[in-house]
Amino acid sequence: MNRQTIISALCCLPLTVVGQVTMNIDLNDRGPTMSDYQYGIFYEEINHAGEGGLYAEMVCDRSFEGGERENGVWTTVGSADTARVSEGLLNNAQRHAMRFTATHPMSGIANRGFWGMSVERDSIYELTFWATKGAFTAQLQSADGSLTFASAEVKQGERRGEWRKYSATLKANASCNDARLALLARKAGRYTVDVVSLFPGTFRNRPNGLRRDLAERLAGLHPTFVRFPGGCYVEGVNSYDEAFQWKRTLGPIEERPGHQNRNWNYWVSDGMGYHEFLQLCDDLNAAPLFVINVGLGHEYQIPVDSIDWLIEDALDAIEYANGDLTTRWGKERAKNGHPEPFNLKFIEIGNENYQADARIHSQQYAERYIKFYKAIKERYPELTTIGNVDSWGHDNPVWRNLHPVEMVDEHYYRWHTWMRENYRKYDNRMRNFLIYNGEYAANGEGKALPTMESAVGEAIYMMGMERNADICRMASFAPIFMNVNDPRWKYDMIYYDSQGHWVTPSYYVQQMMAENVGRQVLRWTESGNSATVDSATAVVVKSPQWLYQSVTVNDDARTVYLKIANPNDREVSLEVNWSNVVPLSCELTTLSAPTPEATNSMEQPEAVSPRSFSYEKFPDKLKIKPYSVNVFRVRF
């Protein structure tokens, strides 16, 4: 593609070009160094992000422990009666099992998965379950049982008392978007089963692993860290029993009791547990950031003078991740299949637990924080700790005590207009502590999907962070995932059901920003970048600037990253003047849409998606499309 063609690709022909912005970039005018962990991802079990989402388990309520929302997921097949029982169980981790009586052969139970199972022709599915006795046939069937896509006799294996482990491999002979798993007794009789699990092929072929397409989307974001497991999910509701407890999530799946995710109102198997989170970080080449409970949750608190055991629990978690094979928890990690340390890098002490109004889940946070901080830094001084500040109520949270703090976690769920207006939020911020923007999104408009307009707002806010990279050291959008059948929090990056997925403009902005992080900020001067009034028409426009920019450099790669966002409804002309550098070739990635409301969907998954171009020489003048985010990689 020649130079003229590329320049034309930047134009939006129906619009008149207004505004003339000039940037003067000097390679020697250096700012702060960028963080090695500038952009990462934040995972929380919300919207069935794991259960029925990233966690590849296809059986819903596999251990028969679910609550009201899981009722009806198990049904009978043929002539059978069922009852959930609480005696004669597999182990102490299990609280219920399923007992069914088959009055005729080939009767039994069926599971429809998470709003229907999706099976693909020629794909392999691995089934395991536990039962007290019997001979079984497993089938993948249509939802009404009229069609069978795979059938196999189930083999017996490991034995624990009266219980035996059964397994089978099922290969689908056809595709179906609304299938079910059926377990059928080959003889009439009474049977008890538990922990029924069905897995497709997983990301990196990990056992008890992750759904490939969704995990690959995470990999596509190139995160430098992963914050997990939440979010409010860390805290639980009513009591600590409903909080994420990492030790209960280790080992074989039949030894994990699971718990009620009361924050978002569904049962969690804990199949995606602490080890699986650490393994995900390993597979993404991202640093783990583990959020710990400090004895504060929704509607409960553990007294501050009674949290020593929680501190020890946090230290044990660090030892599991980083300890060598001579330590108790390092040995346990090796037993679970990972002898090498996971290299946990960050620990966040609490989640949204330092509100100024001192409500229940903020009481005595500072006193709790310092006890955790001292214990962690004494034993693991190399770890970076992160403290909480106000997460809502105002836009200027501060660290309201004299305790040492390495980094604070700020959360901003606001309008896209707020994101634009806060492009310079950190320009005049005190430099007395570092900032992690742990949760942010331009979701204030309350729409069901992120739009191009909101994604541009997020890009502008991120560019503001880059301008202030000396204090804005880490950032992660939130939330990532939503199963479309459970829209608890409607503004996310990745949407899916059992059949497939699509991503939003916000996803592409996160990807573009993360793929193009230089090593040092370049300062620039500019003129003509006030869009308060359109000089041609004297009409006041929405944005105070025509364009928003960030410039960074990677000397080793001899590349300048010029990022430009245009949130306005008109095209803007940009002239770039260079000093102390001769720009050579250039690559452009651009994300734009004809309307601010444009977004993607399952039916139109690429309606708003990036386009890439190559320049033989960086042009002196550019025309920046309306509602666009642009990244120029300029070689020198």
Image: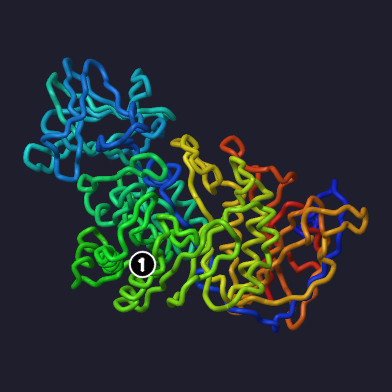
- Up the image or down, 159 lies above or below 556; here it is above
Q: Is residue 338 left or right of residue 550?
A: left
Q: Where's residue 417, x and y in %?
A: 69, 54
Q: Where's residue 151, x and y in %?
A: 27, 28
Q: Where's residue 443, x and y in %?
A: 60, 49
Q: Is residue 140 left or right of residue 289?
A: left
Q: Is residue 622 left or right of residue 438?
A: right
Q: How many marks?
A: 1
Q: Residue type at mark 1?
A: Arg
**Quarter where residue 23 is shown:** bottom right
- Up the image or down, 542 lies above or below 31; here it is above
On the rendered image, what quadrant is the N terminus found in?
bottom right
Q: Is residue 148 visible?
A: yes
Q: Where's residue 144, x and y in %?
A: 36, 19
**Quarter where residue 96 is shown:** top left
Quickly name the residue at label 1.
368
